Amino acid sequence: MTQSKITEYTIAVIVPDADFRETLKMLFDYSFEFEITGLFKKVNELVSSKTPNPDIVLTEITDIDEVAIIKKIFPSSPLVIITGDETGERIVQLFAAGAAHYIFKGSEPTVYLNTLKEVLEEKVKISDSVIKSLLAAKSSDNKPTPEALAILTLREKDILNLLAKGLPYKEIAHNLSISIDTVRRHCFNIYDKLQVSNRTEALNKYFGK
Amino acid sequence: MTQSKITEYTIAVIVPDADFRETLKMLFDYSFEFEITGLFKKVNELVSSKTPNPDIVLTEITDIDEVAIIKKIFPSSPLVIITGDETGERIVQLFAAGAAHYIFKGSEPTVYLNTLKEVLEEKVKISDSVIKSLLAAKSSDNKPTPEALAILTLREKDILNLLAKGLPYKEIAHNLSISIDTVRRHCFNIYDKLQVSNRTEALNKYFGK
DNA sequence: GCACAAATACCACTTTTGTGCTATTGCAAA
DNA sequence: TTTGCAATAGCACAAAAGTGGTATTTGTGC
């Protein structure tokens, strides 16, 4: 007596942990809706495989560039990330990298299945424009702190903006048509005022990290 | 001869400025897709009205508390905010208050119509959990460029993150319990891969300026 | 006119970085 | 099994950055 599945979605799973991977395999094997067409430990396994495009991809990988690679291999398959990161520091980047949704690792099996189905049925979707807006909004937080702005002179800000480009003293000097020693002097004064001891720290402090 | 509208969405508009409100009224009156079912100057006008739930709400109000009130009155209607120059923290807060999207005030009429349609048709939506994550992630926002991500090894990324703090070799070495020479080697390899010649340039390239 | 800050400049010195070599170990893919 | 890369480490030298001192010019405010 065979059991026929009603709505069957193909799913690719990339999960490093062996036990967890097996658990997920069982979950999908016993579900009526999903059929695993690819089960991988790491992204590079996926790279060298010739797995056909699944309807959806589920992965525990949270490294941004690896997520990007998965997205490159299956550009049209929605990508769901399993994460234990409660603070969600990386979540923005994960969405930016192409994730469609995410699931907390400790969630119940039904949460996994329901979230995946929701994503597939397009009930939840985040538009690129919204993501862009959010990222843009966040990056424009990188404005100088008021205190820092107040204590630096105009010229010091000029210098700082050139420091931000990674230019060496010599080029800053040439750029502003002043002597290298003057640039050094300005830098020294900047570090002194911001109470830091090198370029990177100064930039972090001035531009808000 | 009457003109029948094809897809007609109901829309509520809350805009303080009289001229602008009239402009929007005209825009929607002449559009085929929207029918204004509520036109208000302020939020308290909306409160005392008995306007039925519209398909979508458009408002110029950017005060977080008032936005929250609108959201309370029409909990199921997506809310689109018209904003002049709001950047940074504020936009994230607007999303947190329940906004589905926003439009810059100076935008072309078609931008208004298209954005509203996008919100309605694409089910553009951000879940609360994502908003919380975004708020939590805040300033610790580093978004490496995909190309840069692909070529750096895990260890090199470790190093880069410490470089970003402005730490000298010595402290990076101590931090990772490896020798200074190894740190120098990693840095050299990083610069080589990113095709830059110092820390600041590397950080700009990797973290997207 | 004088005081003061900002911008300029030079010198000397130390520390940190950046670059070019070589070389070993371990792991994973071909 | 061999090949290749990641990670480790050492050494030497050149280049740049950072720190201290002093000093001149210029413009603004009192």
Image (spheres, coloured by chain):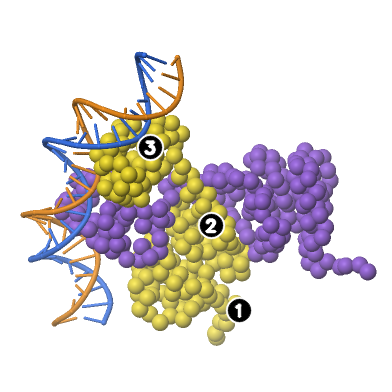
Chain colours: A yellow, B purple, C blue, D orange
Q: Position of residue B47 (x, y in %)?
A: 78, 41
Say what secondary structure mark 1 lies in. Answer: loop
Above or below — where is D21 with respect to B176? above
Tell me the chain of label 2.
A
Mark 1 belongs to which amino acid?
A: Ile
Q: Position of residue B127 (x, y in %)?
A: 58, 54
Name which residue lies at 54% across and 67% down. A116
Query: Left or right of B119: which side holds B191?
Result: left
- The amino acid beneath tag 3 is Arg
Q: Which residue is mark 3?
A: A155
Say left or right for B175 vs A114: left
Q: Which residue is mark 1?
A: A6
Mark 1 belongs to chain? A
Residue drawn at point x = 24 percent, y = 39 percent: A181
State if disc 2 and disc 3 touch (CB < 8 Å): no
Q: Nearer the viewer, residue A151 or B138?
A: A151
Residue drawn at x 53%, y 45% as measured from the top left: B88
Mark 3 neighbour class, 10 Å CA radius: few under 14, some 14 to 19, many 20 or more: few
Label 2, secondary structure: give it.
helix
User: Which residue is under mark 2?
Assistant: A132
The answer to whether A139 is drawn above or below residue C29 in the figure is above
Q: Nearer the viewer, residue B103 or B196?
A: B196
Q: Which quarter of the figure is the C terminus of chain A placed in?
A: top left
Quadrant position of residue A191: top left
The residue carrying pointer 2 sits among few (fewer than 14), some (14 to 19) or many (20 or more) residues within 10 Å by Cα, namely few
Indicate which disc, 3 or 2, sits on the residue closer to the N terminus: 2
Percent from the top left, x then y, of residue B201? 32, 54
Q: Quadrant where the N terminus of chain A lies? A: bottom right
Residue at point 46% right, 51% down? A88
Name which of mark 3 and mark 1 comes first in the sequence.
1
Q: Mark 1 or mark 2: which comes first in sequence?
A: 1
C-alpha span from label 3 to label 1: 70 Å
